[in-house]
Amino acid sequence: MIQQNFIHLYEESFKKHWDLPALTDYRENTTYSYGELAREIARLHLLFKELGIVKGDKISLIGKNHSSWSILFMATITYGCVIVPILHEFNPESMEEIIAHSDSRLVFVNDTLWNNLSRSRIEVPVFEIPSFSLLTTEFADIRKVVESLDHTFTTHYPKGFTREDIRYPDVSNDEVICINYTSGTTGFSKGVMITANNFAGNVTYAHKLDLLFAKEKILAFLPMAHVYGCAFDFLYALSAGVHSTLLGVIPTPQNLINALQEVKPNLIITVPLIFEKIYKKKILPIINKPIVKAVMHIPGMDRLILSKIRKSLFHSLGGNFREVIIGGAALNGEVEAFFHKMKFPFTVGYGMTECAPLISYDHHYDFVPGSCGSVLEGIMEARIESPDPEKIPGEIQVRGENVMKGYYKNPEATTAAFTEDGWLKTGDSGIMVGRRLYIKGRIKTMLLTANGQNVYPEEIESRLNNLPYVAESIVVLRNFRLIALVYPDMAAINADQITPERLEAIMRENREMLNRSVANYEKVSSIELVNNEFDKTPKKSIKRFLYS
């Protein structure tokens, strides 16, 4: 059990960093200091009390990254309640089901999302964020409470709200403080019960790593309703006196670059898709030029070119960061190899929602290509279900401080998630050398060919996705033949005026090129073009179950 009480960690941080900036909404010029953040939390605590909310009650929160989202999240857990963050990208039916399944007493939601929900299916009070005004009309008594909240606050704090007024209830690290509903590639959503200790394991480990320091800055552009962005861009940052700028707009490449250059964060936390796009759109066109290819073969010149690319990329990303942490999915092998070759300060970590989320990590200077870091020492343990864990892939199984309590109101799924001796089954296949993990792919996506070979489609797709005019792909097994489904890069096709006939020829060339780079049992029989982008989870993983 982590010794540091998770809730009191924020009581201490808010007092210590009272005058420092805590949260800024990008493009809105709205900033809260730690003291102002604590004041807004106290205000919501009074609202909860007046509404009869008690410790252990569930509160649903639906919205994009915003200071109001952050305030509501912190107010909920520091009151002793359970937060249910719902990704704003879920469809309305899923949102309604989660609100009902989680037994939420209150709902806080952006008004644009509220307009898409079936109001007859939500029987609890609903509040709008960022204003925290009441949206539902049938609760007249609650409306009076909301309208008189300013008076209630002034009465409760007649001398104003001060550092000394920050006093949060005792919430044991054993208690569930968050239910995070997954949206995985298998199509089944489960409510992961995350305890204070699970979050504490992640946050205290980040402190040991000295990832950030008080007064430093970070740009939160991953959805904080997902545990990856929540744990590090938000919870860890607020525990360390860090200034978080919440992007709040669609993280297009241009939006991201503009924000990164403006904020100049000291640490960048991202997903593979961002760097894969940078590599394909910005770097490949440079290094594939005939003259650059020729120069790269001249001794010493390759280092000069790589140094220039590295310097340009470093500037594009703000020029002030010590490290880029990539997680949430596997990084394309070709992209990883290139960034490592040019000595870019990046690392790849590994985790899952059920571990809130971190399982393994290495600093960029310890990172080994092909790996996803070392299992967190003193926090987590891992084992491989294999006769030879260092050479023969098997399921990665873990246990430790970060492992969830189980799935909410789903004992069958909880039992199925663990081995008989108490290890969490990750569903990922890999090997482990020492404490360092190497992932091969998802067990559920593994394909068994006619000759009995295990094929991990992600490895084939990572190669295919870097070939000309391929935007994204998935490899499926049909009649024991590997078929690559490809959504073409329409922007590039239109820009280059590629005809349908020429595109078919290019895809035949792509298949031949791909098959020369993979094992015989990994060769694809054909490439089939699809008309629309693949449906994805909020983490941008393709929902494979829709295409198998």
Image: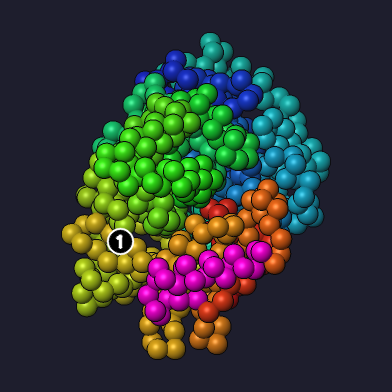
User: Image check: 159 left or right of 417?
Assistant: right
Element on which disc 1 rests: strand
Q: Against 406, is 150 above or below?
A: above
User: In the image as oriented, which residue stretches furthest toward the left?
Assistant: 434
User: Image check: 467 left or right of 341?
Assistant: right
User: Image check: 487 left or right of 344?
Assistant: right
Name the residue that disc number 1 marks: 438
Q: Against 179, is 267 above or below?
A: above
**Is 293 in the magenta?**
no
Residue lying at 67% horizontally and 35% vertically, measured from the top left? 129
Q: Position of residue 49 (x, y in %)?
A: 59, 35
Residue lying at 30% horizontally and 43% vertically, measured from the top left? 298
The amino acid pointed to by label 1 is: Tyr
Q: Is residue 145 visible?
A: no
Q: Nearer the viewer, residue 407 or 310?
A: 310
Please state the extent of the stretch shown in magenta in the rendering: 502-524
User: In the image as oriented, which residue stretches furthest toward the top?
Assistant: 159
Residue lying at 57% horizontally and 71% vertically, measured from the top left? 508
Q: Which quadrant holds residue 163?
A: top left
Q: Against 187, is 131 above or below?
A: above
Q: Position of residue 296 (x, y in %)?
A: 35, 44
Q: Dot 1, how many residues are within 10 Å of its Cα: few (below 14), some (14-19), or many (20+)?
A: many
Residue lying at 42% horizontally and 71% vertically, measured from the top left? 516
Q: Position of residue 214 (x, y in %)?
A: 36, 23
Q: Position of residue 372 (x, y in %)?
A: 32, 54
Q: Is residue 527 visible?
A: yes
Q: Nearer the viewer, residue 530 or 219?
A: 530
